[in-house]
């Protein structure tokens, strides 16, 4: 009986198990290849990781249609009263998590002070981020760092894209360009630019508007609703095919990453106290705080829930991209954790775009760590400013100038 239950579990989680095994085997094979082969040319390394890169590109190919169809159908599939409650709770939890993580990261670095470990407290090098001399003239390094105002402005600009087709592959940002390219001491000016990456925030807003419009028009938009539902079915079928062949790409991808990887000892020595503190903070959140909240609310074993999303964690670890991880996350949450499909199709794509609690915790830790290294004192006003700015970053995924001490 026990053997049958194990066999059934393996059959239900076959592709998840294959993804994890292929990642581990790929890492082991890469380390063995790195230790036995004296030199591996960059061209050979490129072709070793080619299957993995092709799988990543395949997932990126379906991200835009996945977001549009999932968010739009998640709205059309709910009742008018239900979607308001779902949206309110989603945004409330996103803001709460981002602010809590920003406070936690800032507090830990302020208490432990990893940037002051091993220093003589003289604060040498504190002028590194001030002004640099160039003969008789000076150039302010602050001019090279994007301001918080510019970042917030860019967020609003990306919220409403001027071209929805262009938003599928371009996003807006404010760049600082030299007034005179041959003489950087003359300063910089702000200029609107386009980055060749999808405007996920604008696509989410457009998808929500489209879904609400279809919901409001009811039977008059039946044809569009049917088109969205069928499109979502097609995209999900393509996604499942990519998940089935993902173990092949994962093996080659991890093999190439293992060959390129530096020794863990060297990384630990370089990062020292800060690396250990960051790891402890993230592990505490992942293994204690989030499972504790899950148990208090749901009253179920949180670690079974976490085991079911392990394939998504493996993909996230290897890719460092929430967009690439989204299809696997949706499969794990809806298929294995039995999350309601309308809820999953609404919350997960939206969370992929505006839910970045890890960034909200990590960025203030880096800011305060660098300030401590250079002997810069952090006042309570700066501390609160860091928390507020990084809460915004944790919600929007934007990075702003964090080394400016006003």
Image (tube, grey):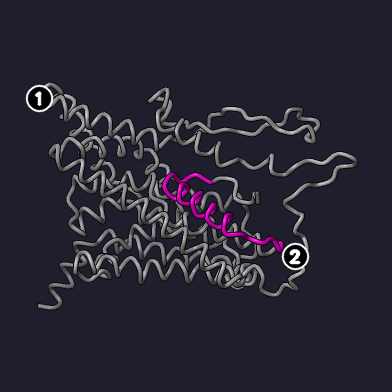
Which residue is more in the foreground, 358 or 169?
358
Circle 2: element type: loop
- Range of residues picked out in magenta: 374-399
Whether the magenta-drawn stretch holds residue 393 is answered as: yes
For the point 15% across and 29% down, the residue is 226
The percent position of residue 260, horizontal first and vertical second, equals: 58, 59
* Lower position in the chain sequence, tag 1 or tag 2: 2
Q: Quadrant of the N terminus?
A: bottom left
The percent position of residue 143, horizontal first and vertical second, equals: 69, 39
Q: Which corner quadrant of the image does residue 84 belong to? A: top left
For the point 41% across and 56% down, the residue is 316
For the point 47% across and 68% down, the residue is 281
Q: Which residue is mark 2?
A: 123
Image disc number at residue 72: none
Q: Nearer the viewer, mark 1 or mark 2?
A: 2
Q: Is residue 67 left or right of residue 12?
A: right
Task: State how many labels appear.
Answer: 2
Q: Which corner quadrant of the image does residue 187 belong to? A: top right
């Amino acid at each position: 009986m026990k053997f049958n239950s194990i066999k059934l579990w393996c059959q239900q989680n076959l592709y998840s198990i294959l993804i994890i095994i292929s990642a581990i085997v790929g890492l082991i094979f890469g380390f063995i290849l790195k230790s036995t082969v004296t030199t591996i040319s960059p061209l050979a390394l490129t072709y070793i990781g080619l299957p993995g890169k092709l799988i990543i590109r395949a997932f990126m190919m379906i991200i835009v249609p996945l977001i549009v169809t999932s968010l739009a159908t998640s709205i059309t599939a709910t009742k008018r009263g239900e979607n308001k409650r779902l949206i309110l709770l989603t945004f409330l939890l996103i803001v709460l998590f981002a602010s809590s993580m920003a406070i936690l990261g800032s507090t830990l670095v302020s208490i432990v002070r990893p940037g002051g470990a091993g220093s003589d407290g003289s604060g040498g090098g504190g002028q590194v981020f001030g002004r640099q001399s160039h003969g008789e003239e000076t150039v302010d390094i602050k001019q090279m760092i994007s301001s918080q105002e510019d970042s917030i402005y860019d967020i609003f600009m990306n919220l409403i894209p001027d071209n929805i087709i262009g938003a599928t592959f371009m996003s807006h940002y404010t760049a600082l360009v030299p007034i005179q390219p041959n003489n950087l001491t003359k300063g910089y000016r702000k200029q609107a630019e386009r980055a060749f990456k999808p405007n996920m925030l604008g696509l989410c807003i457009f998808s929500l508007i489209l879904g609400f419009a279809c919901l409001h028009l009811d039977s008059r938009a039946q044809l569009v609703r049917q088109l969205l539902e069928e499109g979502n079915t097609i995209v999900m079928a393509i996604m499942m095919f990519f998940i089935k062949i993902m173990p092949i790409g994962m093996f080659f991808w991890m093999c190439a990453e293992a060959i390129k990887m530096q020794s863990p000892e060297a990384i630990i020595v370089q990062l020292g106290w800060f690396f250990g503190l960051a790891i402890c903070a993230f592990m505490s959140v992942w293994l204690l705080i989030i499972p504790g909240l899950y148990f208090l609310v749901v009253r179920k074993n949180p670690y079974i829930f976490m085991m079911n999303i392990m394939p998504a964690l493996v993909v996230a670890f290897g890719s460092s991209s929430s967009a690439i991880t989204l299809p696997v996350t949706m499969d794990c949450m809806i298929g294995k954790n039995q999350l309601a499909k309308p809820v999953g199709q609404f919350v997960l794509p939206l969370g992929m775009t505006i839910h970045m609690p890890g960034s909200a915790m990590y960025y203030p830790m880096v800011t305060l760590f660098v300030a401590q290294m250079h002997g810069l004192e952090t006042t309570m006003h700066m501390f609160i400013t860091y928390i507020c700015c990084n809460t915004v970053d944790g919600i929007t995924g934007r990075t702003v100038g964090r080394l400016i001490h006003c």
